[in-house]
Image (cartoon, grey):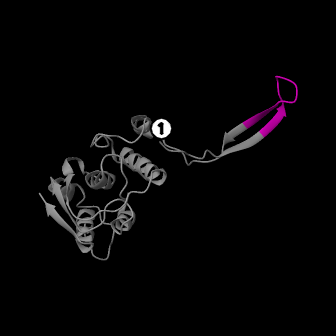
Amino acid sequence: MASRTVGLAITGARPSVLGGTLVDITLTDGGDDRPSPASRPIWAEWYHGPPAESNLWAPYDSQGRAAWLDLTTRAWRVSAPRPDHSGGEYHLDGRFVTDVPGLHCAIAEALLGPGRYFGREWNAFKDCLSGGFGVAPPFTLTWHDSEIARRALADVVEGPKDGLSYFEDIVRLLERCGVTVVLR
């Protein structure tokens, strides 16, 4: 599923109450790079491996969806690389794209299947479009229920230069990279 380094600090040591040459040590939490308690249900969902069904990320809030993306990132790092293929048509289920993490969950699912990684924010998504992640342009992406994302992300602006919403910026990036985007 994933591995995490748990930073523990030794704050004390003394001869063990069990005797002999054993030593009892006292440990304290030495870091904060661990899943939040809110991610517990997501980790439980992934316990036996990446999901096989679509949209299992959809019921979670934005923080839960970000935790979902964290596991897709880790799963991608430990899985065998997939050769890129181009062409074809992919269908994005846009019914649940109501935030940025949801957008990236849905795009990855559309292109590669449930529990797969294809970026978790704009820059990583742009990198994935350059190849090496299983699919590369040119291809066609039919985005069903795209108006849901357009409305939900209307006020999310990443680049102040052009003032485009996150939705518009992602669509423009896809098209610049050679993807034919069909908004439905």
Residue in view at x 44 percent, y 38 percent: 43
Name the residue type under label 1: Pro
Of all residues shown, which one is farthest toward the top? 18
155 over 48 or under it: above or below:
below
- Closer-to-camera residue (24/47): 47
Q: Is residue 45 left or right of residue 136?
A: right
Q: Is residue 76 left or right of residue 172?
A: right
110 over 165 or under it: above or below:
above
Q: Is 151 included in the stretch rendered in magenta?
A: no
- Closer-to-camera residue (105/128): 128
Residue in view at x 82 percent, y 22 percent: 18
Q: Residues within 10 Å of mark 1 (few under 14, many from 20)?
A: few
Residue in view at x 31 percent, y 46 percent: 114
- Magenta residues span 12-26
Q: Based on the displayed image, in which of its 4 quarters is residue 157 positioned?
A: bottom left
Of all residues shown, which one is farthest toward the right? 20
Quadrant location of the C terminus? bottom left
| Label 1 residue SS | helix
70 over 59 or under it: above or below:
below
Residue 152 pos. (x, y %): 22, 54
Please name the residue that numbered disc 1 is placed on: 37
